[in-house]
């Protein structure tokens, strides 16, 4: 007897069926049977099912002689099921990786409940995945399992069959079956939840719910939507037959009327001329099942009276109000923009203030990076200069006490850009900036370049996308100072961003913290992140793939965590453009929203990356680095790199996921060869990152190139120690780099 019977009815879904079946058969929890029901589909669905059955004994094909519809096809699958739990999956949807393992674990720890409810995400044709927005009931704390009356909010989760696992014996004892017609989930899910003696929840996305552009049954215009009335008749008939469920009548009534109003207002549901009849039947149901005292939404009151024309008039008035409001907002924005432009022009005529400096990082993100380190250094080494930080509202909380907080597009913002002497950024400060004589714009860039940048992207259309190179060069013409951490960066920046600026090869200010932090700081950061004591923390930080429309992770972090065992913990840090989390689980910590990547570096014991420039920063910690190059050829062809990472890596290199697991399992990640590679990498790319880079930049920019602190030789630096200890064999002797000298002149 398998643990799960996964039932997949198929009808006219030949383009999606293979992906659906693969998502089930590739689950890391193999104790299942896949019952694929060909609902007399006129396309190749039946043949596809038979092909899978021939390859995998877990697939049990069921071919129906005539088309019976989704509900009865599911019933046919249930008749063949022998698993402990029933899992329904529509044939154009997919299970997420390791979903069944997570479901099995939750069922076991919650005592074999009658029903387990789990989460889902809507996936769109353009690659977007949006998690269910009504998932709060799944995260609610409390005893498990429970009954519906303990958590009635669970009825707010989408009432469908495929986001739940059902104990088969419970279904058979209650005699549950799917009815014919549209909305067949309604008379199944309500009775199942109301009668279940034990329910549990799982706060994890287990199903990807495909949002098809066309072809979705409930999204088609048809009189089949009138089936909704019969389905709610079945729900209330079930309640009548089970008096102990009478307490649910008010909630069922409210949800029924709201469901009717939703179908009525959707333009793609009811055929032309049928709206009046639909509303009349809805009114009859309102009277038949009305429960006094039930609070109703305003639109649902119109259902009560069957006011078809009033309902339409209400919609017209509401639409007119929305249009008027949008027009007013548009006008207000235009007026505001004009006022701000006038204000900026006036400020440009006023004197530049030598005691003002403005900083920002990225697209007005939070305080951090090189600009963040320089802002702190300005307050320390040039205290007479008042600093300000530009950040969007959602990032204002990251700005520490000291600098003035500015929001883009405000009066104070434009005043600061017009009159501050020092402007510091690692990106485009503002497209409408007019840099004045007397202002100094410091461009810090965003790390040592491995991938092609600037003008080199002209030969890489997949990476360049819509880059306006003329506009890019106009921005370069405003730069006065560009920071560089090494000779490689200097030569690259001056070629791909040609301009009249000065290059200060002083090191990366953002990396100063690596030399200043202590063991106590590392322990504190690990505690804040929840890293278990004694665990090896792997910081996984992949880069962005320009050639991919959607950023699919190349590594299965949950599989890696399982294979490596409890000693390892993975800090998953997706690229800021990546999107959602890279993985979930007890030994995978999502740090994608953490404001400081330098803090994550300090808290970790080893960096796992692919082509991210973070490897150049992390090398300053003298901790192990492992590089995964599973798609090196594709990345090199699309983006291009300035050197072959296989020839000059910062540590061990893995070309596949299994090879990566082996590197960690055998200890090669911290072996002597890895240390030798890291030592050579540090010598080449970290000659000036000695903890004083920000001080050197501030003293040069504000006071001129005098009195700069000399560079501490590489072998004399003492970066913050890792929480783990390595074998003495991992320590490599590093010769003093030729660049270790007092810095007096910019390159």
Image (cartoon, rainbow, N blue to C red):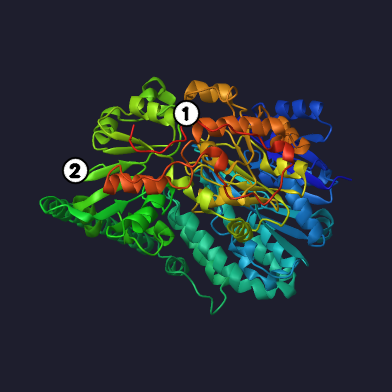
* Residue 324 in picture, x, y percent from top left: 24, 58
- State left or right for residue 96 relative to residue 438: right
Q: Quadrant of the N terminus?
A: top right
Answer with the quarter of the image where residue 72 lies: top right
The residue that mark 1 highlights is 451
Q: Is residue 235 left or right of residue 386?
A: right
For residue 59, side relative to residue 511 (left or right): right
In the foreground, 37 or 744: 744
Marking on residue 434: 2
* Residue shown at 68% from the left, 65% from the top: 237
Camera-side residue: 432 or 128? 432
Query: Quadrant where the C terminus lies?
Result: top left
Query: Taking 470 as reference, is 709 above or below it?
Result: below
Q: Indicate the quadrant where residue 247 lies.
A: bottom right
Considering only vertical position in the picture, is 463 above or below 410?
above
Residue 36 vs 384, above or below: the answer is above
Q: Which mark is residue 146?
A: none
Q: Residue furthest bottom?
A: 293
What secondary structure is marked by label 1? loop
Q: Label 2: state its secondary structure.
A: loop
Q: Is residue 593 visible?
A: no
The crowding category of the residue bearing disc 2, from other C-alpha atoms within 10 Å (few below 14, some 14 to 19, many at least 20), is few
């Amino acid at each position: 007897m398998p643990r799960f019977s996964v039932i997949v009815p198929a009808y006219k879904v030949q383009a999606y069926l293979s992906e659906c079946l693969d998502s089930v058969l590739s689950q890391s929890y193999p104790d299942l049977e896949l019952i694929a029901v060909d609902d007399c589909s006129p396309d190749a669905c039946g043949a596809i099912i038979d092909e899978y059955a021939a390859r995998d004994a877990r697939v049990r094909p069921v071919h129906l002689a005539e088309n019976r519809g989704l509900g009865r096809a599911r019933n046919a699958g249930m008749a063949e099921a022998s698993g402990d739990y029933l899992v329904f999956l529509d044939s154009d949807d997919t299970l997420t990786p390791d979903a069944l393992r997570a479901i099995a674990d939750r069922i076991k720890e919650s005592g074999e409940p009658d029903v387990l409810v789990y989460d889902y995400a809507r996936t769109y044709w353009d690659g977007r995945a949006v998690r269910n927005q009504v998932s709060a009931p799944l995260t609610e704390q409390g005893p498990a399992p429970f009954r519906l009356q303990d958590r009635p909010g669970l009825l707010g989760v989408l009432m469908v069959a495929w986001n739940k696992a059902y104990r088969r014996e419970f279904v058979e004892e209650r005699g549950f079956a799917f009815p014919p017609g549209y909305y067949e989930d309604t008379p199944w899910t309500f009775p199942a939840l109301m009668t279940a003696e034990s329910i549990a929840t799982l706060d994890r996305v287990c199903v990807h719910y495909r949002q098809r552009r066309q072809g979705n049954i409930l999204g088609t215009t048809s009189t089949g939507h009138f089936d909704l009335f019969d389905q709610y008749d079945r729900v209330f008939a079930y309640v009548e037959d089970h008096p102990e469920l009478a307490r649910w009548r008010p909630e069922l009534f409210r949800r029924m009327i709201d469901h009717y109003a939703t179908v009525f207002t959707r333009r793609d549901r009811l055929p032309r001329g049928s709206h009046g009849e639909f509303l009349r039947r809805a009114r009859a149901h309102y009277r038949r099942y009305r429960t006094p005292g039930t609070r109703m939404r305003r639109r649902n009151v119109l259902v009560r009276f069957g006011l078809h024309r009033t309902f339409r008039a209400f919609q017209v008035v509401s639409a007119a109000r929305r249009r008027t409001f949008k027009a007013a907002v548009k006008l207000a924005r235009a007026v505001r923009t004009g006022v701000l432009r006038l204000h900026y022009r006036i400020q440009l005529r006023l004197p530049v203030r030598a005691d003002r400096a403005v900083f920002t990082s990225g697209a007005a993100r939070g305080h951090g990076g090189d600009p963040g380190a320089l802002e702190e250094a300005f307050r320390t080494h040039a205290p007479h200069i008042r600093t300000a930080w530009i950040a969007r509202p959602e990032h204002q909380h990251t700005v520490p006490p000291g600098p003035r907080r500015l929001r883009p597009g405000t009066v104070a913002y434009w005043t600061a850009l017009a009159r501050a002497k020092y402007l510091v950024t690692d990106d485009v400060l503002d497209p409408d900036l007019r840099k004045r004589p007397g202002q100094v714009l410091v461009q810090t860039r965003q790390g040592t370049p491995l991938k092609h940048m600037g003008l080199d992207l002209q030969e890489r259309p997949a990476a360049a996308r819509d880059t306006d190179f003329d506009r890019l060069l106009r921005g370069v013409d405003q730069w006065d100072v560009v920071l560089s951490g090494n000779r490689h960066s200097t030569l690259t920046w001056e070629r791909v961003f040609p301009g009249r600026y000065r290059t200060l090869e002083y090191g990366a200010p953002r990396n100063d913290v690596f030399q200043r932090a202590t063991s106590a700081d590392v322990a504190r950061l690990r505690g804040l992140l929840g890293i278990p004591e004694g665990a090896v923390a792997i910081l996984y930080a992949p880069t962005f793939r320009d050639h991919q429309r959607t950023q699919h992770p190349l590594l299965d972090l949950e599989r890696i965590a399982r294979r490596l065992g409890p000693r390892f913990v993975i800090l998953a840090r997706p690229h800021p453009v990546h999107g959602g989390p890279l993985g979930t689980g007890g030994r995978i910590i999502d740090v994608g929203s953490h404001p400081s990547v330098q803090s994550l570096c300090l808290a970790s014991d080893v960096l796992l990356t692919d082509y991210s420039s973070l490897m150049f920063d992390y090398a300053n910690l003298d901790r192990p680095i492992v590089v995964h190059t599973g798609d090196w050829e594709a990345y090199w062809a699309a983006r291009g790199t300035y050197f072959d990472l296989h020839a000059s890596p910062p540590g061990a290199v893995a070309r596949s996921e299994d090879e990566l697991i082996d590197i960690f399992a055998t200890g090669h990640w911290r072996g002597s060869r890895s240390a030798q590679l890291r030592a050579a990498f540090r010598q080449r790319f970290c000659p000036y990152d000695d903890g004083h880079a920000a001080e050197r930049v501030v003293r040069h920019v504000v006071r001129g190139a005098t009195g700069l602190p000399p560079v501490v030789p590489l072998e004399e630096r003492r970066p913050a120690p890792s929480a783990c200890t390595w074998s003495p064999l991992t320590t490599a002797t590093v010769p003093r780099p030729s660049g270790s000298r007092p810095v007096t002149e910019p390159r």
